[in-house]
Amino acid sequence: MKTTLFAGASVGLIILASATAASAQSIDYGAMEQLFNEPVTTSATGSPQRSTEAPVAMEIISAADIKRSGATDLPTIISRVAGLDVLNAGAAGADVSVRGYVMSMSPRLLVLINGRQVYLDHYGYTAWATLPVQLEEIRQIEVVKGPNSALFGFNAVGGVVNIITFNPKFDNVGSVTVRAGVGGHQEISAVKTVKLGDKFSARLSAGAVQMDEWKNTAGIANNLLTDPARVSANLDTLTQLNDKTELRIEGSWSNVQISEVVSNNSYSPTKYVTSSVKGALASETKFGTLELSAYRNMLSAKHLVVGQAAKFDNEITVVSAQNLFKIGAKHTFRVGAEYRHNEVNTAPIAGGQLSYDVYAASGMWTWAVTDKLSTTAAVRFDKLELERSGTFPAGYPVVTNAYWDRSIEEASYNLGLVYRPTGFDSIRATVAKGVQVPTLVDLGAVQLKVVQGPFTIGVIGNPTLQPSIVTNFEIGYDRALPALNAKIGASVFVQKTEDVKGQPSTTQLDIAPTATSLPIISYRNIGDSKMKGVELTASGKVEGGYHWSADYTWTDVEDQPLAGYSPAGRSAAFERTTPAYRGNVALGWENAQWAADGYVRFVGGFDAYNSASVLVAVDGYASVGGRVARQFEQGFTVALSGQNLIEARQRQTAGLEAERRAYLTLTKSW
């Protein structure tokens, strides 16, 4: 008999209740940015808001911020957001988390492009190099901190990165960028929006980049490394069917090779091919704003795991519907439903197929209690049904596919409110409980055999694995200082993760051998983990074209393992792998022709897993990046930028050392 593997009810006074609520369709962000004099979001309540007014901890990175950053990739850009942790495994491989708990193939962060998930759903992590967007086509990046399962569903347990591109209906953009740099960096990209009459508009982008991998200073076997390269393309079209109805069709493709660290902490020369297609129909009706959307993501991933070639073919299909409507002037409601199907093969040992179906219903209520006080309540219910088909490797314990007909039911909730006592002050209080559902790899897609001394050990996923539950309490305060043309903010947060997932470990057998079966290691829930922290931010502008910002985040993690389990041995020693502090300082200046920006990122010491899954100390460090640019007539810009400028090589992880890289960029915009 099939039962439910995952059912989450998400109740909250916080952002939207639908997984598609982050979509940017029919929203003129440029007009809203001019109105508010800063980037705004509609992801929180459906109405335009400053990030400090939204009932969720959020920072917005604008297109201007991206341009000034001098960065060539998304992890570098978002590493400058308060509280973000980034492990750079190589020149193009990185793992990102929010406020700690970063790990190889970190599965705690949900990443979206215009509301479509772009993390890789066989293991729930983001391979940033596969994202099929050029930096020049990004309107803004919204970084949401803390669990938000009521809004975004799977993976939104540590945070959300919502990437919003320029909308061809409202934005007229076009550019060609050519970049060259040390380390064999060669890059070209192009972005263009077009309009055909009043009814049809489109944005097309494409790009290619290649570079040398960082020097192998960590003793990694050379066959586990590769020089990064990527080719990608993206198409986004909007058709106005009538005055109140719009159809948006999107498609993307990427082909990538990178050196990355896989979940057992070893390097892999990984190759990815991704493709996607999405359609969304939105209509203003007398019943509210109705939206129906569907998308399919397809992935081919080739890893090298324990010296064995593992090829995963993963497909996910998502169909959702929602309606946003108002009752009176103070009450806004959203109701929605979603279905998703996710499937992947077993690897490195083939023969099996895992899949699940998810059925979800959601609802949201926003109440503007007064002009100064507002709340938002959301509820979401998910039902996930898991199944397996195919054969099992020889020597594995005798089980049948029926063992994968499992069920788990969990409740999650979000609570929050925003109070603005004056026009300059904002107080935000939130309570959130998110659900980190086990991935298909966790549940059984991984099948391999490893030799440990004279023994052969089997590795397989665990269909009985429980979801991790993340509960977060947070109070935030923001204040504008108009006399100084500045703003400051402070947040205090406490978080607990229950049923932490531990990785398979050859130091601990999970299933003893028998006369006919091998010893087995697998994924296990190994206990709980607690975290508390403080976040401080400040930013402003000074007469003469200067701008500045600074942030500091302190966290303290305490692991609470179950008897018999070692977080260190299970690659889940977050108490040791989370730095106590991280922060950023930025200073920039610009006039009509010139722009100069400098960035300093500092990270406290922490322990990190090396390729043998042994914890080693990584000293605290500071990295420096910068950009100087000159703008000429006819839309030409020449920029000199660089990253990791302090030293030729700097140890930032237990793997390859980060290299100093400098770039010369020529951009033609029109």
Image: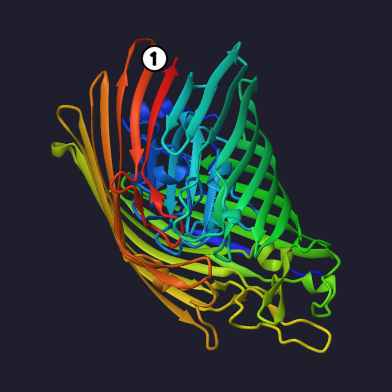
Q: Nearer the viewer, residue 245 or 565?
A: 565
Q: Quadrant of the C terminus?
A: top left
Q: Nearer the viewer, residue 101 or 156?
A: 101
Instruction: Judge left or right: residue 618 versus residue 288.
Output: left
Q: Tell me if I can see residue 421 in this picture.
A: no
Percent position of residue 253, x then y: 65, 35
Question: Where on the picture, by quarter, is residue 554?
Answer: bottom left
Q: Mark 1 — residue?
A: 635
Q: Residues within 10 Å of mark 1 (few under 14, many from 20)?
A: few
Vertical placement of 470 versus 362: above or below? below
Instruction: Judge left or right: residue 603 versus residue 613.
Output: left
Percent position of residue 273, x then y: 67, 42
Q: Tell me if I can see residue 580 in this picture.
A: yes
Q: Quadrant of the N terminus?
A: bottom right
Question: Where on the picture, by quarter, is residue 321?
Answer: top right
Colouring mode (rainbow / by chain / secondary structure / one colour): rainbow
Vertical placement of 299 versus 390: above or below? above
Q: Which structural element holds mark 1?
A: helix
Vertical placement of 432 versus 549: above or below? below
Residue type for callout 1: Gly
Q: Nearer the viewer, residue 185 or 627?
A: 185
Percent position of residue 491, x then y: 30, 58
Q: Residue at x 40, y 42 (%)?
A: 77
Instruction: Judge left or right: residue 454 versus residue 205.
Output: right
Percent position of residue 419, x then y: 31, 52
